[in-house]
């Protein structure tokens, strides 16, 4: 049904570890997004259906409220809330799945526990240049979401029937959010074959869209209005735009985690703009999000100026300095990098 993108050796090894293991830890990246959560919970429900009863999803820190409806989300263990418990689970796991990240740095303070753990580690991810820290590295950047990869891995193990409705809801969420609701990285026809199969499992894809994108607070919408009206700077010559928000501004609009999700994409709706950057002051660093359409390599810009990386059209990074300095780095980068 689906083409065999993933190498057979990886499937055999992953299946063997999975069959032998009794306890499982599933780890995802800091500031988890829909794909990190969707792939992890998809795998969680599959393993549970398969009969494994010691399976835990572990995240470095909290995730946006609009993902809390995901089946199983309530049982996710957050490392910065329960550090000892999270580390113990990782330490004791027979098998550790690393989902939606390509290097230990992406899980922040959880990294030492992961690197020290003796369980068999399996990476399933779609970011470029995976580091060598797992026994099995299943990395396919051409696949648009890790959630889709989880679906493919399960199918290739011959266990398609064990994808229940809960797993299907999680997997669909990750596929939807990592493609901007199928508006980018979404031309592969098999994406729609997979969606068809998920719908057969009973998911309501329209309801999932509403659960994720139509549950915002009034203050979030006003913050978006403010960001666009007062804070967006457009650089027509470089086909670029920037939005920056300080802690003080965020507080004014009662910011909670996830409120600025998607802001970085907004300037891309301007005709002629193909590179957009969003800069947000966090507690001890400045978070940078970069998006592009077409050939502009956000990941190269992110790695050159913000010690970050990611995909060609969606990248991120962290900047250790003031918001103003981060904006200056961006403007300088634009001159150097875009006008070259
Ligand atoms: P976002 O802007 O949604 O936080 O991140 C978009 C994408 O950029 C993520 O899927 C991830 O691939 C990448 N990314 C985000 N932050 C970082 C970072 O600090 N370092 C690296 N290497 N990649 C990042
Ligand atoms: Mn992803």
Image: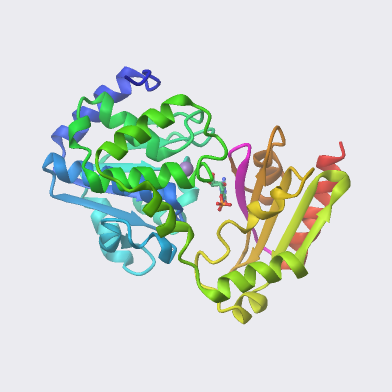
> Looking at the image, which is closer to me, 207 or 305?
207
Q: In which quarter of the image is the C terminus?
A: top right
Residue 32 location (% of width, % of height): 44, 55
Specify start and end residues of the magenta stretch as a single range: 311-322
Seen at 18% across and 32% down, the residue is: 161
Seen at 46% across and 53% down, the residue is: 33
Q: Decide if residue 19 is in sight here.
A: yes
Seen at 47% across and 62% down, the residue is: 214
> Looking at the image, which is closer to me, 162 or 138?
162
| Residue 199: in magenta span | no
Q: In which quarter of the image is the N terminus?
A: top left
> Looking at the image, which is closer to me, 336 or 132?
336
Residue 96 location (% of width, % of height): 28, 43
| Residue 320: in magenta span | yes
- Is the residue 323 above or below the residue 33 in the image? below
Quadrant of residue 336 within the rendered picture = top right
The colour scheme is rainbow
> Looking at the image, which is closer to me, 260 or 120?
260
| Left or right: 9 in relation to 256 | left
| Left or right: 58 in relation to 232 | left
């Amino acid at each position: 049904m689906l083409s065999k993108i993933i190498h057979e050796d990886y499937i055999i090894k992953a299946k063997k570890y999975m069959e032998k293991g009794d306890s499982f830890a599933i780890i995802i990246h800091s500031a988890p997004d829909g794909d990190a959560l969707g792939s992890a919970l998809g795998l969680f429900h599959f393993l549970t259906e398969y009969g494994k009863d010691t399976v835990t999803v572990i995240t470095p820190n909290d995730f946006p409220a609009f993902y809390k409806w995901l089946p199983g989300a309530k049982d996710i263990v957050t490392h910065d809330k329960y550090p000892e418990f999270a580390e113990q689970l990782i330490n004791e796991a027979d098998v550790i799945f690393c989902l939606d990240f390509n290097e230990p740095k992406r899980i922040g303070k959880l990294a030492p526990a992961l690197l020290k753990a003796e369980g068999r580690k399996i990476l399933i991810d779609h970011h470029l240049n995976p580091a060598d820290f797992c026994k099995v590295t299943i990395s396919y950047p051409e696949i648009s979401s890790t959630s889709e990869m989880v679906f493919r891995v399960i199918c290739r193990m011959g266990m398609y029937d064990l994808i229940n409705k809960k797993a299907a809801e999680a997997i669909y969420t990750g596929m939807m959010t990592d493609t901007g609701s199928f508006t980018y990285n979404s031309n592969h026809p098999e994406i729609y074959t997979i969606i068809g199969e998920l719908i057969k499992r009973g998911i309501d894809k329209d309801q999932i869209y509403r659960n994720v994108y139509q549950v915002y607070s009034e203050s979030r919408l006003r913050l978006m209005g403010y960001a666009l009206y007062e804070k967006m700077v457009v650089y027509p010559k470089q086909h670029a735009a920037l939005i920056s928000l300080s802690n003080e501004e965020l507080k004014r609009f009662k910011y909670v985690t996830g409120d600025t999700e998607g802001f970085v994409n907004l300037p891309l709706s301007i005709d002629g703009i193909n590179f957009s950057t969003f800069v947000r002051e966090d507690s001890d660093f400045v978070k940078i999000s970069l998006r592009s359409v077409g050939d502009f390599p956000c990941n190269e810009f992110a790695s050159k100026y913000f010690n970050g990386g990611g995909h060609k059209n969606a990248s991120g990074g962290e900047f250790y300095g003031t918001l103003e300095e981060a904006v200056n780095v961006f403007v300088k980068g634009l001159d150097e990098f875009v006008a070259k």
